[in-house]
Image: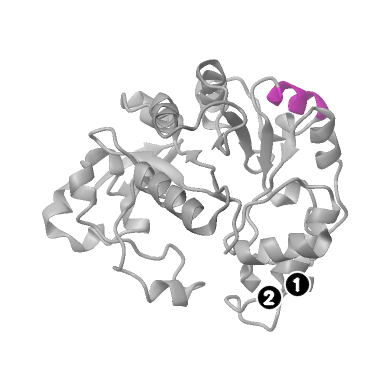
């Protein structure tokens, strides 16, 4: 599909293996609920300040996770993907790196890896920190230094600052809704919000430890009340002034995710004009983006060159 980078979300197992899952709660994206041998592992716990019930990666060994099969996270929106439910197992981070290296050979081009460290504070409290393990996995596979095709991303702050001290791989600070706080800052009681981090001074502080920022795309072009795109903010210019690249998320082709003017028909799951939306954001000065349909993002970029 032409993607420049592969972007896995990383969580960790009880025996300290990195695996790719959007959530550490397994019933969202696997068939764990259909495995009676794991029924007793279901529990309720707090994740990043929110109560969640289900089965969690930190309670399973890698061998146990490999008996599960993955399912589509949003089947009502992506019924085509849901037809593949049960076809694949949970990949490890190393397996993803191996796949990327294989694709680099077959496609004769560089393909980067862009992992997100999920729930850092939660896993540190369980004595299952991921940061050094991510760096060591990259090092063993030859990814060293700021010229490597790698970004490591997180919604938290302190783990990125820690990473800055142990690696020269590039780092990206993710941004959730402006009124939200990075969870490590909630725990520390600093009061810092993502809105604070999006100001010119906040971006300069982020630039002390990160090479790039990954804001929700509404930071760059907010929606009007009718769900159409509004006017661009100064976020891109302010980030560039601080020396940061800007990689917003997430660009998706289904109507339910698109601004009103780029939707097609009335069905939320219908495919609209994602290329049109991306072209507007490219014109606003972004340096890259996260997309669930990278072929369309590549096409939009080609049209803007």
Q: Residues within 10 Å of mark 1 (few under 14, many from 20)?
A: many
Q: Residues within 10 Å of mark 2 (few under 14, many from 20)?
A: many
SS category of the residue bearing label 1 = helix
Q: Is residue 22 visible?
A: no
SS category of the residue bearing label 2 = loop
Considering every residue shown, the one lying at the far top of the view is 165
In the rendered view, would you say 16 is above or below 217? above
Left or right, 236 with respect to 73, comes to right
Left or right, 118 with respect to 297, comes to left
* The magenta stretch spans residue 29: no
Mark on residue 272? 2
Considering every residue shown, the one lying at the far bottom of the view is 265
* The magenta stretch spans residue 204: yes
In the rendered view, would you say 129 is above or below 177? above
In the rendered view, would you say 158 is above or below 33? above
The answer to which image quadrant residue 180 occupies is: top right
Q: Residue at x 69, y 84 (%)?
A: 265
Q: Quadrant of the C terminus?
A: bottom right
Q: Residue at x 38, y 25 (%)?
A: 124
Total labels: the figure holds 2
Q: Main secondary structure of the magenta part?
A: helix
The answer to which image quadrant residue 86 occupies is: bottom left
| Residue 209 vs residue 157, the one in the foreground | 209
Mark on residue 162? none
Q: Quadrant of the N terminus?
A: bottom right
Q: Which residues are magenta?
A: 200-207
Left or right, 11 with respect to 205, comes to left
Residue wearing tag 1: 262
User: Circles 2 and 1: CB distance less than 8 Å?
Assistant: yes
Q: CA distance from mark 2 to mark 1?
A: 6 Å
In the rendered view, would you say 284 is above or below 15? below
x and y, in percent, of residue 167 in the image? 52, 21
């Amino acid at each position: 599909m032409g993607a420049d980078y592969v972007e896995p979300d990383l969580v960790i197992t009880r025996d300290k293996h990195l695996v790719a899952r959007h959530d550490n709660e397994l019933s969202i994206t696997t068939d764990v609920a259909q495995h009676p041998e794991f029924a007793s592992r279901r529990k309720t716990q707090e994740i990043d300040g929110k109560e969640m019930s289900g089965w969690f990666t930190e309670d399973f060994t890698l061998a146990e996770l490999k008996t599960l099969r993955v399912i589509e996270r949003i089947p009502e929106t992506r019924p085509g993907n849901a037809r593949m439910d049960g076809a694949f197992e949970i990949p490890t981070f190393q397996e993803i790196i191996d796949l990327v290296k294989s694709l680099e050979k077959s496609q004769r081009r560089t393909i980067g890896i862009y992992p997100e460290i999920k729930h850092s504070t939660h896993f540190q409290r369980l004595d299952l920190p991921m940061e050094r393990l991510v760096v060591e996995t990259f090092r063993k596979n030859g990814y060293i230094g700021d010229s490597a095709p790698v970004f490591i991303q997180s919604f938290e702050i302190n783990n990125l600052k820690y990473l800055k001290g142990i690696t020269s791989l590039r780092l990206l600070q993710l941004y959730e809704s402006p009124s939200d706080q990075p969870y490590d800052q909630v725990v520390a009681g600093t009061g810092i919000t993502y809105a604070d981090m999006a100001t010119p001074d906040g971006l300069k502080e982020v630039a002390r430890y990160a090479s790039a920022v990954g804001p929700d795309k509404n930071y760059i072009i907010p929606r009007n009340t009718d769900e159409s795109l509004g006017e661009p903010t100064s976020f891109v210019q302010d980030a560039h002034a601080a020396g940061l690249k800007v990689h917003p998320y997430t660009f998706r082709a289904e109507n339910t995710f698109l601004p009103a003017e780029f939707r097609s028909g009335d069905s939320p799951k219908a495919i609209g004009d994602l290329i049109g939306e991306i072209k507007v954001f490219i014109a606003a000065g972004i340096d890259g983006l996260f997309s669930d349909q990278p072929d369309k993002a590549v096409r939009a970029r080609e049209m803007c060159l």
